[in-house]
Image: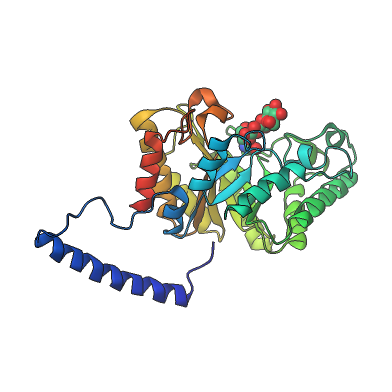
Amino acid sequence: MTELTPERSRRGSWRGLRRTLVLGLAGSLASAGLVALTGPSAHAADTLGAAAAAKGKYFGTALSTSHLGESQYAATADAEFNMVTPENEMKWDATEPNRGQFNFSGGDTIFNHATSHGMKVRGHTLVWHSQLPGWVSGISSGSELTQVMDNHITNVMSHYKGKIYAWDVVNEAFQDGSSGARRSSPFQDKIGNSFIEHAFQTARSVDSSAKLCYNDYNIDGVNAKSNAVYNMVKDFKSRGVPIDCVGFQGHFNSQSPVPSDFQSNLQRFVDLGVSVQITELDIAGSGTSQADNYAKVVNACLAISKCDGITVWGVTDKYSWRSGDTPLLFDGNYQKKQAYTSVLNALNG
Ligand code: G2I
């Protein structure tokens, strides 16, 4: 997201003055009984993307080629969101199923749909142990795997060079639990700790216009895993390894609720000099408790100027990766849920 330039800030002050005048006039008319003042704000935006944009943030969704042909799916996404993450289409198994053979058909479908409807795109994800073709896991030499990783990053990022808002360069490289250790993966086991910084360095050299993020789950509050990620980012910053953002996936349920220190945890990462993004938000539940949890997440991001935006991990409960948890903002019939209204009100607040 663009920083606040002097010009924008002047426009902001003008907006403030204009708002004072408009509200003053509206107040006089109201007291004269000429108009009724209704709602929280006369200028409240009526879509998630527009409401977020008014606060200098984005509000995105994961999108899947499997459902784009369903008119309500596409129409809901196009109306509400201003950022898109391909749910599976830019992952390694989709983009390089065989060594050296790249396939961007699914990624391009999502990219073209998003950009032709005015939405930006987050790239997801370049280096991840999951949805990784067997031929990659089968490589036993660390130096060969490093070359293969570099070649993958280079080809995928070059295809979308200059067009991607942010890339999840490395995804889910740390273990859950109290160890704070790296997760065993082909990259970790064969290349070693340096694979992450190597991936970021390669990514920067290919497309310096994309923000480069590390993305993970269960790092939303302060815990051993988020401490380990925090220490990695701190180390990267101190040594000049290029990293611009940390993605907090935000998959919440009753075992893993929105933590009370969510906002302060985001803030400590911002204090290291990166921005933060909520990248895969979904919250199990229903009704008021789900709506309240969504509001907590949105309010935390709004409170942090370097929280770039929020992406929910899907459009409708019908196609959620965990649809039994009904974790999204639209139900299976594309009706707005209480959680939707809660998010929109928080963004407009
Ligand atoms: O698992 C939830 C997310 C955790 N963080 C990284 C995300 O990339 C991940 O997304 C999910 C997708 O939402 C699922 O759609 O990643 C899953 C796989 O790790 C995706 O599921 C897979 C199915 O397991 C495959 O059977 C299927 O072929 O989606 C594939 C494409 O439809």
Q: Position of residue 349 (x, y in %)?
A: 33, 52
Q: How is the image coloured?
A: rainbow
Is 3 positioned to the left or the right of 40 in the image?
right
Q: Mark yes or no: residue 261 visible.
A: no
Q: Tell me the residue at 38%/53% (across/down).
A: 45
Q: Position of residue 83 (x, y in %)?
A: 56, 50
Q: Tell me the residue at 47%/51% (across/down).
A: 49
Quadrant position of ligand 1: top right
Is 236 positioned to the left or the right of 40 in the image?
right
Q: Mark yes or no: residue 244 visible.
A: yes
Question: On screen, 129 above or below 310?
Answer: above
Question: On screen, 210 above or below 9?
Answer: above
Q: How many marks?
A: 0
Q: Tell me the residue at 28%/57% (across/down).
A: 42
**Viewer-side residue, 309 vs 103:** 103
Q: Residue furthest left?
A: 32
Query: In which quarter of the view is residue 15 placed?
Result: bottom left
Is 65 positioned to the left or the right of 258 in the image?
right
* Rendered-image quadrant of the N terminus: bottom right
**Viewer-side residue, 50 vs 242:** 50
Q: Position of residue 191 (x, y in %)?
A: 82, 44
Is 88 positioned to the left or the right of 25 in the image?
right
Q: Position of residue 332 (x, y in %)?
A: 49, 28
